[in-house]
């Protein structure tokens, strides 16, 4: 999938740094944009682009980590870390999907679609549900963001343990 070495050294630590920065940052921005329309207005397309970059960085780090795993001593800690790494992709995907959905909703693309495909009353019903939609977006955003950040922390902790314990 992606490069496994960079200038002759394993690329996994480089990809991991991208994940450690991009996933929590996109999760935080997701929650802020879901909760405060003013933040969403300022963020605009940055939210889905940042979440997309985070999403892409996860499988790159995972693939480079699996390549590296084949070249280091096999221990229970390394095996546990590898298994945990696979668990971040669904959380990152959830952050990305919600980021795109918020951006689409903010841009009014959904309102335009509803207005074109239904009678005038349908548009009024959609906007009347705005507070419910925003509440659901905030709750889903909090769940996805918390899951992603906690998983990044757990994977990072297991990696540090695998590398530095028993040295």
Image (cartoon, rainbow, N blue to C red):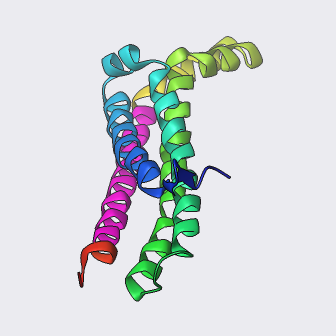
Residue 135 appears in the picture as rendered: no
**Residue at 42%, 87% in the rendered image:** 75
Q: Residue furthest right?
A: 117
- Residue in the foreground of this view, choosing between 158 and 28: 158
| 144 magenta-colored | yes
Q: Would residue 12 appear left or right of 158 to someone viewing this image?
A: right
Which quadrant would residue 166 be assigned to in this image? bottom left
Q: Is residue 158 above or below residue 133?
A: below
Q: How many marks?
A: 0
Which quadrant would residue 160 be assigned to in this image? bottom left
**Residue at 32%, 66% in the rendered image:** 154
- Residue 126: x and y in percent read 55, 24
**Residue at 47%, 81% in the rendered image:** 79
- Residue in the foreground of this view, choosing between 38 and 91: 91
Residue stretch rendered in magenta on the structure = 132-160
- Residue 35: x and y in percent read 32, 31
Residue 55 appears in the picture as rendered: yes
Q: Is residue 37 above or below residue 65?
A: above
| Most frequent secondary structure within the magenta stretch | helix
- Residue in the foreground of this view, choosing between 64 and 44: 64
- Residue 165: x and y in percent read 24, 80
């Amino acid at each position: 999938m992606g490069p496994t070495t960079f200038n002759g050294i394993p690329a996994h630590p480089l990809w991991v740094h991208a994940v450690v920065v991009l996933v929590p940052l996109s999760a935080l921005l997701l929650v802020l944009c879901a909760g405060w329309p003013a933040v969403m207005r300022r963020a605009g397309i940055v939210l889905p682009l940042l979440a997309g970059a985070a999403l892409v960085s996860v499988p790159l780090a995972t693939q480079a980590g699996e390549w590296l795993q084949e070249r280091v001593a096999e221990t229970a800690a390394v095996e546990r870390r590898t298994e945990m790494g696979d668990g971040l992709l669904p959380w990152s995907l959830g952050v990305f999907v919600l980021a795109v959905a918020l951006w689409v909703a903010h841009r009014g693309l959904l309102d335009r679609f509803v207005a074109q495909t239904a009678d005038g009353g349908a548009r009024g019903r959609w906007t009347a549900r705005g507070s419910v939609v925003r509440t659901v977006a905030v709750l889903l955003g909090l769940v996805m963001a918390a899951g992603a950040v906690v998983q990044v922390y757990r994977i990072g902790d297991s990696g540090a343990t695998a590398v530095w314990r028993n040295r």
